[in-house]
Amino acid sequence: MTVADRGERLHHAPPLRHPERKVYVELHHALLPSTSAAARDAPFDTASIDSETRESPFGSTTARFLSPELDLMLIAAGWCRDVAGLLGLRITPRPLVDAVVLIDSCDVDWDRVANWSRDSFAGACLAILLTWLERHDAWRGPATLTATLVERQHFVNATSLRMIHAIFDRHVARGRRSGRFLSLHVLETVLDSLIAPRPAWRNIAHVPWNVAFPRREPRRFRPGFVVRRLSAPFRPR
């Protein structure tokens, strides 16, 4: 294999690419990048990762895999990071399928998952994912689990969950096009605001400010940029 990219080092080494099969392999030194709010949560520290690996047959050899509980938390944290990050509404729903398959095929210890979620941003990510699946009857777990996940952390609440789910339902699951006022950029800014490591009501309160002055946009306070943004819905297409 050859090094395909020598870009900025994140939570994995530059990807390796097989020159003939075009297969990419990333060698991770952490499960999440340090920029992820969930990376600071248990059980994503090195000691916890070591204790959460399990040996299992893989073809003709034996490999080590993450426990289903840690794997589920990782899927949720990575999915929310992509939704609230550069991918936004261009994200694929595939991680949701991964979560459903994992839950259906493994005996998940939900008490451990609930304990990890206490005061945890990763717990908020899992609450977003599981409540969405539950609303669509894609998964049914313990009766009080999703309510417990919402109660045990303060990053999302019932109101912010409804807003996140509504955007995802309409513009990812159903593929609706964005409009003049609720443009793709505006909707992604709303998601970026709601899935943030702040108390849920602060996240909701930040939505109007961030829509007017997107935090990822370095020109956000320049008068010309602000005028162009505010006038964009009224310009002919």
Image: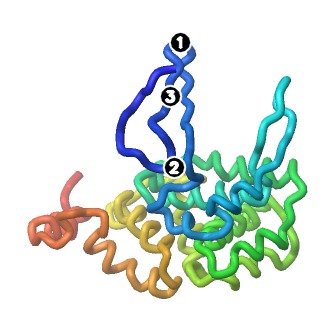
**Residue 135: horizontal and vertical position, in percent?**
73, 67
SS class, disc 3: strand
Of residues 234 and 50, the one drawn nearer to the viewer in this rendering: 50
Q: What residue type is labelled 1?
A: Glu
Residue 204's x, y, as percent? 46, 82
Q: Which amino acid does label 2 sit on?
A: Ile
Q: Which residue is drawn at 44% across and 62% down?
A: 35
* Residue drawn at x 69%, y 80% as measured from the top left: 118
Residue tagged 2: 91
Describe residue 80's horizontal placement relative to residue 71 as left or right. left
Q: Dot 3 corresponds to which residue?
A: 16
Q: Do the residues labelled 1 and 2 touch (CB within 8 Å)?
A: no
Q: Residue 20: which numbered mark, if any?
A: 1
At a point 54% along the width and 73% down the height, the residue shown is 163
Q: Nearer the viewer, mark 3 or mark 2?
A: 3
**Res 153 → quadrant:** bottom right
Residue at far left of view: 224
